[in-house]
Amino acid sequence: MHIKQIECFVHLAETLNFSRTAEFLFITQPTVTHQINSLEDELGLKLFVRTKRKVELTPAGISFYNDMKEVLTKTNIAIAKAKQFAHTFESNISIGYEGNVEVKYLPAILRAFRAKFSHAHIYLKIADHKEKRNLFTNNNFDLIFAVKESIDDLSDAVYAELFTGSFVCVLPKDHPLASKAMIKIDDLKDYSLILLDPMKCPTEMARIQKDIQIKCPTSTIYFVDHPLISYTMIKGQLGIAVMPDFVCPEDSELVIVSTEITDIISYGIVWHKNNPRSEIKGFVSITKEIYKRQNTD
């Protein structure tokens, strides 16, 4: 088993589309097919069920994907570190985050960090809540941006709050609830609701969503993997969404309205307690300063 097989498998497991996988990896579709076939032959397992209409993971394929996705991430980090250390960089710093909407000042942070620590190579990876936590606890990430509740039980983690958020409702401008100053949970009854996948979001978010489902038993529920997917579905008239305000980008077609949900979400930067490297301390210090300055303006 080699890295090209793993890359093909992981990307095909995520896209379930041979042509898209080939395009992403800059190889031909027959090459993808060959890599998958050779991997299945080597393992003696059927990883995919393939028909003319669709591609699906087998139960063995799902299990293998859950493990190999992390293996591929570790491998890519290791390769990146090795290549960069072989050239001009003296150290490496790996950072995990969920998206540019939450960490909207990341470009400014990177510019300031680069100016002060030009010898450090930066590795960035977008990962969902669960993957980000796993990679951090396994020391594959030096730093992560995360909701506080998601790391409260990690004894090795140090957390610095950058901002707090609240729950809002996102809906089309012409929706009956769009003119309200504040939306109550009872107002959501009988409307189709778009919620984040409870398996991929922090416990606090999952808890709020569960309460909404209980109070709105007749609502049709759609679960999505990412807040930006919610926006597409809202515009497609499939429903309205309830989510933290800091994952809601501005959109001229949609309205963001406050809700009666009083829970406050703390979002910040996390690093390992026993990591004494100056680059880590420097990145944290720069991040805190930039957010403090932006929050004051």
Image: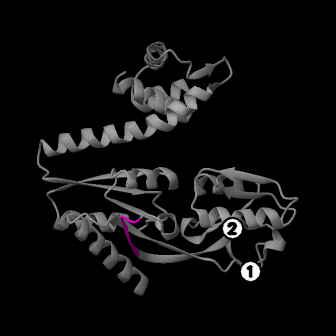
Which residue is drawn at the image coordinates 34% and 52% (left, top)?
124
Residue 153 visible, this orientation: yes
Which labelled disc corresponds to residue 182? 1
Q: Pick whichever, 76 or 238, lies toward us.
A: 76
Q: What residue type is labelled 1?
A: Met
Q: Pick whichever, 41 or 225, lies toward us.
A: 41
Which labelled disc corresponds to residue 208? 2
Q: Do the residues labelled 2 and 1 touch (CB within 8 Å)?
A: no
Which residue is drawn at the image coordinates 60% and 63% (left, top)?
203
**Residue 245 percent location from the top left of the image:** 59, 71
Side of 179 where 138 appears, left or right: left
What residue occupies the far bottom of the structure in this picture?
296
Element carrying mark 2: helix
Here the colouring is one colour
Closer to the observer: label 2 or label 1? 2
**Residue 123 percent location from the top left of the image:** 30, 51
The magenta region covers: 155-160
Residue 242 visible, this orientation: no
